[in-house]
Image (cartoon, rainbow, N blue to C red):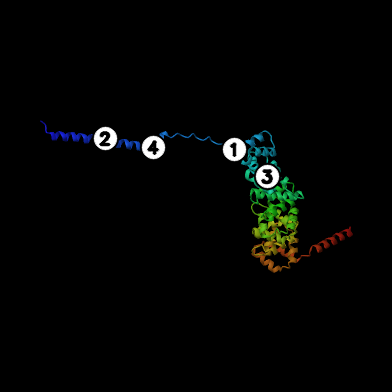
Amino acid sequence: MPNIGIVLLVIAAIAVGLWLASRLEKAYMRRKSGKARVAEEHPVSRRIESIPTKAPSPVMEDPADRLADRLRERKANGTNLAAAVTSVTVEFGDRVTTDSVIRMAIKVGYRPNEVAVFMAQRYQPAEIADILAEEGDFGVEELADAIMPVVDGETELLRAERTFEIVKSALQIDDDNEELLQLPGHHGCSGDEAAAIVYNNTDLCLASVLKDLKLFASPDVAARISKNFGVDLSDEDEYKTLREDDGVEFGAAVLMLKACGKDAETIIAAEHAYEEFSGDQLDEVFSSLSVAGFTNEEIMIGIARADVIDDNSWAAIIRGALESKVPMEDIASVLHEEDLDPDDLDTEMRELEFEVLTRVDVLHALLHFKGKSAVQAEAANIESNQQQIQ
């Protein structure tokens, strides 16, 4: 018969095991129930797949594009600028300003003169030009033609000058811009008026203005303009500007300075300061000054007094005169007037290796010079005697 004690132990072990299994099952159920409550209280912890996806927003049209489209439609339909600005402003309400509509109208191609006239009700001419230059791509003449009708001025000349100033500022162009310099002439200004406008509203010197406006072709006009502004065109800087960079030729410069009242000495000195020349380069000096109306005597004395020849030799001047076909009597007249010593002159001519016959001719002319009045009187006496004999 089995031992009663062992049976009791087995029964006790089974009871304990059942009890432990019951406790573990209850603990598991409580833990599972707690996780479910947390999930209900905190939706973030739900599975990502359960979150619904938001639909994409529709693409909105750019307001500036809509404004441009509306203005293009009205322009295509022949609507004038004033009506187009009014209707578009009403349509867009607070989303646009009159200024923004006008700027867009320029961009879509409304004519600048129509824009200027419309804007003149609220803006000054300079402001109109600035806006047109900022929003459009206009040349000097096109912008000027749009601005000038709205510029105030008692005369056309004043309006042309004011327009010149406004356009130059709006386009921010250089003083020597060719299209800008031609603007006064485009508006009907004379040469004198055009020169005054350009000279007063740029930093260009007067010589540059005359050259750029091609006014040196009329020496009298150039002389009148220089006198009006009190500018000496024989000044070194002015003369250099006049002559350099394919500017005025020497002959034209001589005519201009002579018209300004300059003597041969001043003209020769100005040319020599610009481009030095020596005794063997006097042929152009003689020819150019002769064409301008200077006498041979004035030219020779001008060369001597301008001190432009390196050795300052009268012999060099005489050689230049002879090569320029100056008559011997004119040479003798100058030598006599300057009271040159024949011996000194002969020494100079020997140093420059004059031919013997040439030296003799020069000295003979000097020593036997009678002056033109005396020669003319002698010729008159000879003619009178011949008439008496006949």
In the displayed structure, does residue 29 sit left or right of residue 333?
Answer: left
Outermost residue, left side: 1
Name the secondary structure under disc 3: helix
Labelled disc at residue 143: 3
**Closer mark to the observer between disc 4 and disc 3:** 4
Vertical relation: 217 (above or below) 230: above
Quadrant in the rendering for residue 112: top right
The alpha-carbon separation of the residues under discs 3 and 1 comes to 26 Å
Q: Please state which amino acid type lies under the numbered disc 1.
A: Asp
- Distance between the alpha carbons at the discs numbered 4 and 3: 74 Å
Ranked by sequence position, the earlier of labels 3 and 1 is 1
Label 3 neighbourhood size at 10 Å, few (<14), some (14-19), many (20+)? many
Residue visible at 19% across and 35% down in the picture: 13
CB within 8 Å, label 4 to label 1 = no
Q: Residues within 10 Å of mark 4 (few under 14, many from 20)?
A: few
Q: CA distance from mark 4 to mark 2?
A: 27 Å
Label 4 or label 3, whichever comes before in sequence order:
4
Q: Position of residue 226 (x, y in %)?
A: 73, 56
Q: Are marks 2 and 1 in contact (CB under 8 Å)?
A: no
**Disc number lying in front (4 or 1):** 4
Quadrant of image for the N terminus = top left
Disc with the residue nearer the chain's start (4 vs 1): 4
Find numbered disc 1 in the image and state the secondary structure of the residue it sits on: helix
Q: Which mark is residue 365?
A: none
Q: Are marks 4 and 2 in contact (CB under 8 Å)?
A: no
Q: Is residue 235 visible?
A: yes
Q: Position of residue 246 (x, y in %)?
A: 65, 51
Q: Nearer the viewer, residue 68 or 389?
A: 68
